[in-house]
Every structure is written in C-alpha cells, then in structure tokens.
Image: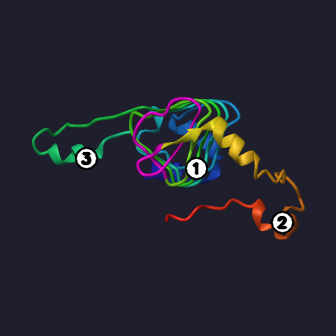
Amino acid sequence: MWNKIIAIINKYRKSPIDYAKSLGVSIGENCKIAIKNWGSEPYLIKLGNHVHITTNVQFINHDGGVWVFRDEIPGFDVFGKITIDDNTYIGNNAVIMPGVHIGKNCVIGANSVVTKSIPDNMVVAGVPARYICTTEEYKLKMLQLNTDLKNNNGKKQLLEKMPSDGFIKKNSLR
C-alpha cells in the first residue's frame, strides 16, 4: 500500500521528464514533455534529443487484443518498442502504437493514431496517420503565415489587430 502512495506522490512531485525517467523512459537532451502517463511498459520507450511530447499523447507498447486468446493460451502477450528520433513534435492526443519508430525531423498531427513507422522528415496526420508532406514543405507553407510573435509580451494585442489573411484558414470539405 505504501508503495502505491509513494508512486502517486512522486508522479505529482516530479517534473514530467524526471517522472518519465523514473519509470524507465529513455529521454535525450532538450526535450519538452507535457505528459505523465507512459502506458504499462514505459521502459520500452526511447526519445531522442529535442523531442516535444504535447498533452494527452498516449504510448501503447502491447497488443491487448491477444486477451481473447488467454483462455486457450494463458501467458499470451505481445510487446513492441517505441522509438522517437531527434527533433520530432508529437501533437496533442496522438496515439503511438507498439513497434512504431518515428524518424528525425517529423511532425505528428494532433489526434493522429500512428500505426506504422514514419521515415525522417515527414509530416503525418489522421486516423490512421498518413503522409501529408515533407517537413521542408511544411516549413515553407508555415513561413508564409509566420507572425514572429513567439515570446512576445504584446502577442494578445497584436493578434487582435492582425488582419484575417494572417491566420491559418482551412479549406472546406467540399
């Protein structure tokens, strides 16, 4: 009982990076992490340098579906390591499935379910995650909308005055 209480206290007392490391997650330098839930096998997760894990990202390292065979094969269990290479961004609510390797310089869109490994320099999104463009193409597209307001104390006022053509706009489905 005391071990569970101490584990709960540590979860809230430690920074997300320190907590992840205490669970066995391998984390490189200069990472930004906004989660404290690392699934049931956190020691099977490896993050490179300069990786950003945003809110509510989920890591799944096992295939729970084999549960349906446990009456027949009681010890049936299947696992997969997850590796995320350097300079990669994982958007809010993304789900990373077992055995996935995400390459360097990648962007994973919010709410994506990554079921396959992603090569270097790709932007993917969707359910399941699919190729959108290269990171270079993404950069060129986003540079057209760059407001240069990161870390600007007057950001709110400047955004309120900005013309509508300065914001991201999504096309209609039709």
Residue 65's disc is: 3
- Near-viewer residue (49 or 26): 49
The residue under label 1 is 91
Residue 167's disc is: none
Q: Outermost residue toward the bottom?
A: 160
- The x and y percentages for residue 17 are 63, 41
Residue 104 occupies which quadrant of the picture?
Answer: top right
**Which residue corresponds to the image point at 63% horizontal and 37% vertical from the top-left?**
135
In this rendering, would 42 be left or right of 51?
Answer: left
- The x and y percentages for residue 62 are 34, 40
- Residue 95 visible to an observer of this rendering: yes
Asked if residue 40 is positioned above or below residue 119 in the image, the reply reads below
Please name which of the two marks, 3 or 1, marks the residue nearer to the observer. Answer: 1
Residue 18 lies in magenta, yes or no?
Answer: no
- Near-viewer residue (61 or 133): 133
Magenta range = 112-130
Q: Outermost residue toward the left?
A: 72
Residue 162's disc is: 2
In this rendering, would 39 be left or right of 154?
Answer: left
**Which residue corresponds to the image point at 82% horizontal and 65% vertical from the top-left?**
159
